[in-house]
Amino acid sequence: MDAQRTGPVTDSLDRRIISALQIDGRAAWHRIAAALGEPERTVVRRGTRLLESGLVRIGAMAMRGSSVVVGVRCAPGRARITATALARRPDCVFAHVLTGTPDCLAELRWPRERLAGLVLDELAGLPGVVETRTLPVLRHVRTIREWHAGLLTEAEIAALKGSARADAASPPVTDPLPAGETPLELTRADRLLLHALADDGRRTYDELGRVSGVSEATARRRLGALRREGKVRIRAVIEPAVLGLPVEAVLWVRTPPARVDTVTAALAASAHVRYASFVTGERQLLVLTAFPDETALHDFVTRSPWLPDVASVDVSLVLTTLKRGGMPAPWLQD
């Protein structure tokens, strides 16, 4: 079974609340209302409905290891099985089935010192694999948690980030860890706390304290410290179709080394770019995008001002997604 394409949320306020949750998944409703200039009662009602309907899911992911992108060419008829095996890995951040080659694309968090074992043993043992390409991420330009589709003003974004800094329980949203940086190991209480947050990143501190065996105040303090130190990321996970962007595409961009910074700056400025990373291999930039239709995608890869600075752009459409932001698709959990 494939994930159903969700129709767009037609109300612009719904989309703006979603964008606010993408900036800080644990932001209190009153803080979101203040940042957006909307009545708190309305934001509570709308936000609660979005969460209860599953249109937005808030989860947490421990940041261990380094980012590695894996592309897999599969035997005929085996792409769904291979992608499912990748998505079920606890170290998998996202997993997509694509048109063209590779058939499957995933990002894993894996210790660099154990990369040989991943390439030579684990990936080779996946069902349906014909060929794999393993591309360590050297630098993240944008990760999914920084993307909010350009629906908020700079002032609203600043207000949301400022609210987070003012709340000790919601530390500031920081830049992603360098691709090769590995945070320290977690304590048992930390692991229990993160397990509780994995499928509901908005659990109360009282719930987190009871699950992890500590007081509510300790749970609040520990989660704040874990977020500040970059050991955990609270993510708002959505289907781009919910924001009116149902056409997802993966771009492989090859550019002269001297022009990489120019191209990455342009990509990072685009509201259509959900994710961009500098990876090893002949096509240095991996870019995940979302558009309202295929015409908009065509315009992006043929008319963007940064195109004179690149040597080639290869495009694959996303057929189905089995994991986003470390959270399996709901239908995969059934």
Image (cartoon, grey):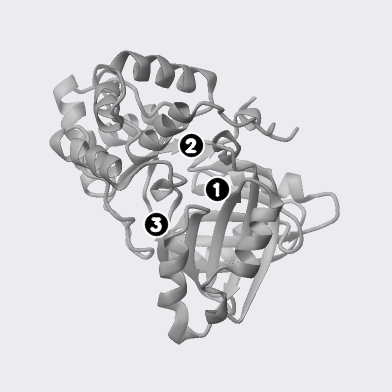
Give the quarter of the image for residue 241: top right
Q: Earlier in the sequence, mark 2 or mark 3?
A: 3
Which amino acid does the dot numbered 2 rest on? Val
Which amino acid does the dot numbered 1 rest on? Phe
In percent of the image, x 27 and y 17: which residue is there?
A: 210
Residue 166 seen in the current view: yes
Task: Label 1, secondary structure: give it.
Answer: strand
Q: Which residue is mark 2?
A: 237
Give the quarter of the image for residue 286: bottom right
Q: CA distance from mark 1 to mark 3?
A: 15 Å
Front tag of 2 and 3: 2
Q: Earlier in the sequence, mark 1 or mark 3?
A: 3
In percent of the image, x 34 and y 22: which residue is there?
A: 203
Q: Quick check: 70 left or right of 228?
A: right
Q: Quick check: 144 left or right of 28?
A: right
Mark 1 closeness class: few <14, some 14–19, many ≥20 residues within 10 Å: many
Q: Nearer the viewer, residue 198 or 291?
A: 291
Residue 3 in the image: state x and y as whole percent.
68, 34
Q: Which residue is mark 1?
A: 94
Task: Label 3, secondary structure: give it.
Answer: loop
Pointer 2 and pointer 3: residues touching (CB < 8 Å)?
Answer: no
Q: Nearer the viewer, residue 5 or 120?
A: 5
Front tag of 2 and 1: 2
In percent of the image, x 21 and y 37: which residue is there?
A: 164
Q: Earlier in the sequence, mark 2 or mark 1?
A: 1
Q: CA distance from mark 2 to mark 3?
A: 21 Å
Give the quarter of the image for residue 105: bottom right
Q: Which residue is mark 3?
A: 65
Q: CA distance from mark 2 to mark 1?
A: 11 Å
